[in-house]
Image (cartoon, rainbow, N blue to C red):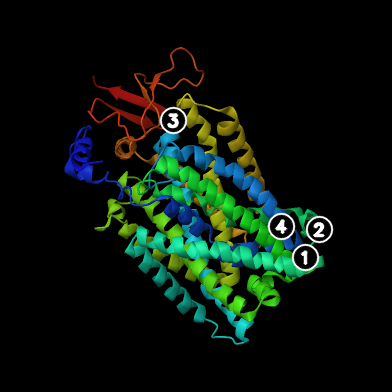
């Protein structure tokens, strides 16, 4: 989009105020290609890091049934991915799921959904840095050298780790993703090759017994394991938060999401099987207690050099696995602040490279404080389990909200497909709901606080959404629509009606469709559209 058209778009809306125009600037457009989007998702998933952290946590509950828990997770994850793909073909924003629900049912539930994803990604950062400092470092030093270090040394390691993450985030998203692209490719190939070598060397110990849920202590344990397994492969959604910076977001993001998820889901299933038979499926109750079981298995069946190399790869993966959610969380907060919701406008400040520097710095600082408190209060390992479980609960509550609004969005497009837009999202939500329930009953002392924190956050988000004054919601709607217009919005806007009739009667509004992905219906300033809560209202000036 040329500068002349950019300025024209900003000045054709109701408010021509310069400060108002500043609030609707998008992040730098068109600088990220397909493989940047793909590896943003892969980095969020962090195969080597998740193998060391989240997969180990899942094994703590699933025991020898770890591969079975991944089968459940992959099924549920595939159904959840459906919502991401369909939304990303229509809406492009740095707000990700916040923007999707915003476009579907308005700002209030957009805020509620977005706040759940903020809690989720924030706690991905917190659990990653706590795991590296307080769990992984003591474990690998003990395993590889037999030495130990001071009890509270994890605090210094954690601070150093988050500082490195912040420095790369400060350099800009392009630098982050260029690094991810090179290292991520090697990580995927190396993890697959090492796991294949373990499975071959296991030989006659390969077995189908690991696909039986009875190997887990209880049904509740297999449910928690499935939720954590699902969380370990859930980072595919990270590409959606780069919607304003991608070259062709509505075409490339859906493909990047599908490819990233498919690649990593198969790799995780493969790794869960290889590590289980490599460790010994009857002895998996001791798997998580070793702190670095993956390193131990690769060292046992391959060489010490591979073991050390795996340590380096895991540290790098944890680095990228914290950097990706930091970038995603900061961009979502930026989108909130730009639209004038929840966060003050200072969080929408960007640097010369148009990176959201204020929100990035605040997320990094607060994540460090929360991780420190959790580690000191519960111990590093239990603190990590609590933070990662909270992140998974918040993430899937957010996914459920997005799932249940997808049908509404496509109904309003007059493009509703009952199977993909209603049935699949509802089934996915039910499956995730069962896993969420079993994290609460019967309760686990370590994870007891997780549904409480998540529930309190959800309630506060709902209350905050419904207490937000109408004029602020309307102003947020105008800014949101301006951003979508600047991004060449392609989803349908209702014209010429003040009500949305769910019955589909003859009074239903007329609809118009954007014909071209780069087109722009409001380029001449002829009309403006806004969503107000669950109704789409349009004022048309001819």
Q: Which mark is residue 281?
A: 1
Depth order, front residue of 84/106: 84
Estimate how packed mark 2 is, as few (under 14), some (14 to 19) or many (20 or more) residues with alpha carbons within 10 Å.
some
Mark 1 and mark 3 lie on one chain; the one further toward the N terminus is 1
Q: Position of residue 135 (x, y in %)?
A: 58, 73
Q: Position of residue 419 (x, y in %)?
A: 60, 30
Q: Which mark is residue 209?
A: 2
- Label 4 or label 3, whichever lies nearer to me, is 4
Q: Quickly name the residue at label 4.
A: 67
Q: Quadrant of the N terminus?
A: top left
Q: Quadrant of the C terminus?
A: top left
Contact check, label 2 and label 1, Cβ < 8 Å: yes
* Structural distance between the alpha carbons of marks 2 and 1: 8 Å
* Structural distance between the alpha carbons of marks 3 and 2: 50 Å
Classify mark 4: helix, strand or loop. helix
Mark 4 and mark 3 lie on one chain; the one further toward the N terminus is 4
* Structural distance between the alpha carbons of marks 1 and 4: 10 Å
Q: Is residue 141 above or below residue 396?
A: below
Q: Is residue 298 above or below residue 276?
A: below
Classify mark 1: helix, strand or loop. helix
Q: Which mark is residue 534?
A: 3
* Structural distance between the alpha carbons of marks 1 and 3: 51 Å
Indicate the quadrant where residue 367 lies: bottom left
Q: Is residue 82 above or below residue 212?
A: above
Classify mark 3: helix, strand or loop. loop
């Amino acid at each position: 989009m040329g500068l002349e058209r950019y300025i024209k778009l900003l000045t054709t809306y109701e408010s021509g105020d310069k400060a108002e125009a500043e609030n609707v600037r998008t992040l730098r457009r068109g600088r990220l290609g397909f493989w940047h989007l793909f590896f943003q998702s892969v980095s969020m998933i962090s195969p080597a890091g998740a193998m060391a952290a989240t997969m180990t946590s899942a094994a703590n509950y699933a025991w020898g049934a770890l591969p079975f828990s991944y089968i459940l997770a992959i099924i549920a994850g595939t159904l959840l991915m459906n919502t991401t793909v369909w939304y990303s073909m229509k809406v492009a924003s740095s707000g990700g799921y916040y923007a999707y629900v915003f476009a579907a049912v308005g700002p209030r539930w957009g805020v509620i959904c977005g706040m759940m994803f903020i809690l989720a990604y924030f706690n991905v950062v917190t659990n990653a840095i706590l795991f590296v400092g307080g769990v992984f470092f003591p474990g690998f030093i003990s395993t590889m050298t037999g030495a130990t270090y001071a009890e509270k040394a994890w605090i210094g390691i954690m601070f150093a780790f988050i500082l490195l993450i912040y420095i790369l985030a400060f350099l800009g998203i392009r630098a982050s993703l260029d690094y991810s692209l090179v290292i991520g490719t090697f990580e995927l190939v190396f993890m697959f090759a090492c796991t294949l070598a373990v499975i071959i060397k296991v030989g006659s110990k390969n077995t189908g017994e690991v696909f039986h849920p009875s190997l887990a202590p209880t049904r509740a344990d297999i449910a928690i394991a499935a939720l954590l397994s699902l969380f370990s492969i859930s980072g595919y959604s990270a590409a959606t938060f780069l919607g304003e910076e991608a070259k062709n977001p509505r075409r490339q993001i859906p493909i990047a999401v599908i490819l990233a998820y498919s690649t990593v889901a198969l790799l995780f299933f493969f790794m869960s099987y290889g590590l289980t038979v490599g460790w010994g499926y009857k002895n998996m109750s001791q798997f998580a207690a070793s702190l670095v079981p993956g390193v131990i298995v690769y060292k046992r069946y391959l060489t010490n050099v591979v073991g050390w190399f795996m340590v380096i790869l895991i540290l790098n993966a944890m680095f990228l696995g914290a950097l990706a959610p930091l970038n995603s969380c900061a961009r979502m907060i930026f989108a909130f602040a730009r639209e004038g919701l929840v966060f003050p406008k200072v969080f929408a400040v960007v640097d010369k490279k148009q990176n959201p520097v204020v929100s990035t710095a605040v997320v990094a600082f607060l994540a460090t404080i929360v991780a420190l408190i959790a580690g000191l209060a519960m111990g590093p390992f239990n603190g990590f389990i609590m933070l990662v479980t909270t992140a998974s609960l918040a993430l899937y509550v957010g996914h459920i909200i997005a799932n249940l609004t997808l049908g509404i969005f496509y109904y309003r497009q007059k493009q509703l497909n009952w199977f993909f837009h209603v049935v699949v999202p509802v089934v996915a939500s039910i499956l995730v709901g069962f896993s969420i329930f079993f994290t609460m009953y019967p309760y686990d002392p370590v994870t007891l606080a997780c549904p409480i924190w998540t529930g309190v956050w959800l309630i506060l988000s709902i209350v905050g959404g419904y207490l937000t004054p109408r004029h602020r919601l309307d102003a947020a709607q105008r800014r949101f629509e301006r951003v979508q217009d600047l991004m060449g919005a392609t989803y349908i806007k209702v014209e010429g009606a003040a009500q949305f009739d769910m019955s589909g009667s003859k009074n239903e509004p007329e609809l118009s469709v954007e014909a071209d992905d780069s087109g722009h219906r409001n380029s001449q300033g002829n009309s403006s559209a806004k969503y107000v809560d669950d109704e789409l209202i349009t004022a048309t000036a001819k």
